[in-house]
């Protein structure tokens, strides 16, 4: 069942330096119980896409200029603020990038989880506190009853991230948006958080929209993947297809930049240099007539520079926005 439909979403920021086309025509579906990853380098529009869905952008500077966001058949782009408040944190929840800045430093952990349950589920203070305790147990925080009365600064980074997940799941949302949920965590804690999210998805049936720049996280957790570049979709496929046969030159560039452990090359001192993607992302304050990746692409032609490539289906629901994708169907092991 499709829970969330995004069609041709475009979000622009209106600044003194011009119009920033942060998101420029993004479309996808999110099915019940699946994890959909959105991947790309910083500034490609991943987080703005998520914030646009929940209408959390500052209306004085940002505006959805076209497109549609439909949740369970209900259009969100035209919904008033009262209607959005009923959906945010209840039907659709979000885990933000930095738990230390997202959590209120002067409220206890228990209060912050309970207030969400009070507001959306109509629970009494006692019942909401019991719900907070239940959620801390669910996200595997040890000695949960004591932690209820502690404050964010008393917790480690991994524990604060678990608290953010507990707040997000307190009202049993249908969709969970996780924006870089493992940023700034060490590798061990990162693995624990990802395992926790997988377990919660299986246990609660929540659909997850996972935003990340880490292809390793995508490979571990996602069913399907969208690759974004300069506010546009470059490629969309199942995780298995994307890693087995990336079609877009940008995706292949990201794959080549992943460090690999080659024991023979390491022993002989022949370890190859990582292949960087040369050039810079184009400024989003200017209209891009053709393919946004063309200035950095080895396959680019004159057509690529003047004609925006459509997102075409190449088979098995693998879609790519590239005029020349058939020229280099490189397999990356």
Image (cartoon, helix red, strand yellow):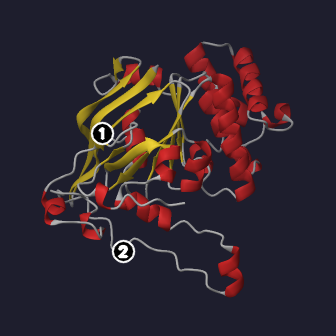
Instruction: Answer few, some or many: residues within 10 Å of disc 2's Cα (few below 14, many 20 plus, some between 14 and 19).
Output: few
* x 63%, y 58%: residue: 184
Question: Could you tell which of marks 1 and 2 lies nearer the N-terminus?
Answer: 1
Count of all numbered marks drawn on residues in the image: 2
Report if the CB atoms under discs 1 and 2 are less than 8 Å apart.
no
**Label 1 vs label 2, nearer the camera:** 2
What is the C-alpha distance between the residues marked 1 and 2?
35 Å
How crowded is the residue under tag 1: few (<14 C-alpha within 10 Å), some, or many (20+)?
few
Residue 53 is situated, as x and y percent measured from the top left of the image, at: 39, 34
Dividing the picture into quadrants, the one containing residue 74 is top left
The image position of residue 240, as x and y in percent, is: 53, 45
Q: Tell me if 167 is positioned left or right of 324 in this view.
A: right
Residue carrying label 2: 278
Q: Which residue is mark 1?
A: 59
Whether residue 108 is visible to the viewer of this picture, yes or no, is no
Kindly identify the residue that appears in the image at 42 percent across and 40 percent down. 50
Which residue is situated farthest in the bottom direction here? 269
């Amino acid at each position: 069942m499709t829970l969330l439909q995004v069609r041709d979403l475009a979000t622009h920021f209106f600044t003194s330096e011009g119009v920033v086309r942060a998101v420029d025509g993004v479309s996808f579906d999110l099915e019940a119980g699946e994890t959909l990853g959105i991947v790309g380098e910083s500034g490609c529009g991943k987080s703005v896409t998520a914030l646009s869905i929940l209408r959390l952008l500052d209306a004085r500077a940002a505006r959805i200029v076209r497109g549609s966001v439909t949740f369970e058949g209900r259009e969100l782009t035209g919904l008033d603020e009262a209607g959005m408040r009923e959906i945010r944190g209840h039907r659709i929840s979000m885990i933000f990038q930095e738990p230390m800045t997202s959590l209120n430093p002067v409220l206890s952990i228990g209060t912050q989880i309970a207030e969400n349950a009070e507001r959306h589920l109509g629970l009494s203070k006692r019942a909401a506190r019991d719900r907070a305790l239940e959620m801390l147990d669910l996200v595997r925080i040890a000695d949960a009853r004591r932690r209820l009365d502690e404050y964010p600064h008393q917790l480690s980074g991994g524990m604060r991230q678990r608290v953010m997940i507990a707040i997000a799941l307190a009202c049993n949302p249908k969709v969970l948006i996780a924006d870089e949920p493992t940023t700034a965590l060490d590798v061990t804690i990162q693995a624990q958080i990802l395992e926790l999210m997988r377990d919660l998805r299986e246990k609660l049936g929540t659909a997850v929209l996972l935003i990340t720049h880490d292809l390793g996280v995508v490979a571990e957790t996602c069913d399907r993947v969208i690759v974004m570049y300069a506010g546009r979709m470059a490629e969309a496929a199942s995780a298995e297809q994307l890693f087995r046969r990336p079609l877009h030159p940008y995706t292949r560039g990201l794959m080549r930049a992943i460090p690999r452990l080659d024991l023979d090359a390491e022993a002989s001192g022949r370890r190859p240099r990582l292949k960087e993607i040369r050039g810079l992302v184009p400024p989003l304050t200017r209209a891009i007539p053709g393919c946004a990746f063309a200035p950095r692409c080895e396959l680019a032609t004159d057509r690529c520079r003047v004609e925006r490539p459509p997102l075409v289906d190449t088979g098995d629901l693998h879609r790519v926005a590239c005029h020349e994708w058939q020229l280099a169907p490189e397999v990356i092991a």
